[in-house]
Amino acid sequence: MSDSAQLPAAPSSAKLQIGDKTLDLAVVVGSEGEHSVDVSKLRDATGYITLDEGYRNTGAVKSGITFIDGEQGILRYRGYDIAEVAQNATFIETAQLLFHGDLPTAEAHAHFTKLLSKHDEQTFEDIVAAMSGLPATSHPMATLSAMINLTSGRYSDSGFNNKAEFEEDAARLMGKVIILAAAAYRTSAGLPILAPKAGYSYCENFLYMLFSTPTKAHVPDPDVVDALDKIFILHADHEQNCSTSTVRMVGSSGASMSASCAAGVCALWGPLHGGANAEVLERLEYIHQSGMTPAQFLERVKNKQEKLYGFGHAVYKNFDPRSRVLKKAADKVLAKLHVNDPLLDIAKQLEDAALNEDYFKSRNLYPNVDFYSGIIMRALGIPTNMFTVLFAIGRMPGWIAQWKEVRDSKSKIYRPRQVYVGPAHRAWKK
């Protein structure tokens, strides 16, 4: 719960009665006042298990990385409010915060940045060689997941023996992922794969590798770099979502950092998870092609004849705190680039309606982070099929931190129970 939430003092235990048996269950209270009932010994004591399809009301882990209060619109990384993180830290500093729990010292930051550059150079030739074996028509997310696994084969990638080894593996994976993402796009576009440029920051290098042509090297604009950095920061972690839970599940088996994060890429690829910002653009394209005005489309939304993507959020019942940060970046980038794009004009009209009309405000249908990240990436010229790839780049530090937390805790392998509803025992018949 948030600082402002008022809850009664938690009891030390709860009682569960099943038939004539009463079981005392411990109450566990998190550092932000979240109350939970520990049912881990329920089956041993009673023979019963809990049923919570989709894990919507199940706390499967204790984690010290990210805190969300959806009712209050709060997101914190390691205790720091997301707006403060986005204003004061770079994406790489944010990654180090998520990994280790504290902001990096200048020395630690310089060391990790040096490791990133080192592994950029080491992995480039491996990536070029491996990419030649993949069809140019592969979806960038398929390429990203496959290549994370494929190119990790020459390294031990355990990341668990000591801090130095973890730093090496984390830097290698983060350095690799922007090269892979840019390479996947350039291969599909028939362009040569580019190596990172010495002296460029993480986001500068990604833009350089993505947009340079054979005749002209791309020089990243500082405001565009800042907007991309913020997109990555705001997506860096989001508690126990589908892809993060997948990373933790795979990591609990003892699988390597790369294998676990490659599984996270596959989970993120699903349209119900990482495809939301692409759906925003698809909906804008639909409005444009239909010939409807934005006002006419919104009337159809109000009449439940159309779906509105990029507004409201399943977790945040008020305002998505990330969208407040990204709106400023979007306004700045759009004003600077002077992009003449009918889809962005439609987006602006939808945004104005959602922020000012009672219908949307009363239902908390405010523009969310997917809305603003989608229109920023559209303005930058990033293809829609790359949107989820950028989401994966941003989420990589969170996945690595969550994988590390599982390994540091020496967790048992995750093994959910089930309620079997198939045929009961039956005799074999020829």
Image (cartoon, helix red, strand yellow):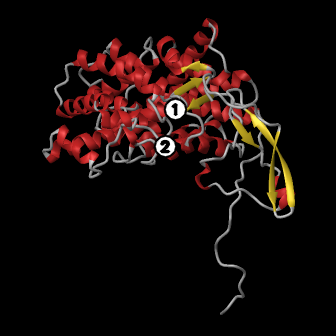
Quadrant of the rendered structure where residue 373 is? top left
Upstream in the sequence, badge 2 or badge 1? 2
**In the image shown, does 359 or 103 lie closer to the viewer?**
359
Mark 2 and mark 1 in contact? Answer it, CB < 8 Å.
yes
**Is 320 rendered above or below residue 276?**
above
Q: Provide residue 29's location: percent of width, then percent of height.
A: 74, 33
With 395 as the anchor, is 162 left or right in this view?
A: right
Q: Which quadrant is home to the N terminus? A: top right
With 173 as the anchor, is 131 left or right in this view?
A: left
Quadrant of the rendered structure where residue 100 is? top right
Is residue 365 among the parts visible in the rendering? no
**In the image shown, does 205 or 118 lie closer to the viewer?**
205
Q: Which residue is mark 1?
A: 395
Q: Provide residue 23's location: percent of width, then percent of height.
A: 85, 53
Q: Residues within 10 Å of mark 1 (few under 14, many from 20)?
A: many
Is residue 317 among the parts visible in the rendering? yes
Quadrant of the rendered structure where residue 239 is? top right
Q: Residues within 10 Å of mark 2 (few under 14, many from 20)?
A: many
Q: Which residue is mark 2?
A: 268
With 273 as the anchor, is 278 left or right in this view?
A: left
User: What residue type is disc 2 on?
Assistant: Leu
Q: Secondary structure at mark 2?
A: helix
Q: Provide residue 414's location: percent of width, then percent of height.
A: 71, 48
**Is 284 rendered above or below residue 305?**
above
Q: Which quadrant is home to the C terminus? A: bottom right
User: What residue type is disc 1 on?
Assistant: Arg
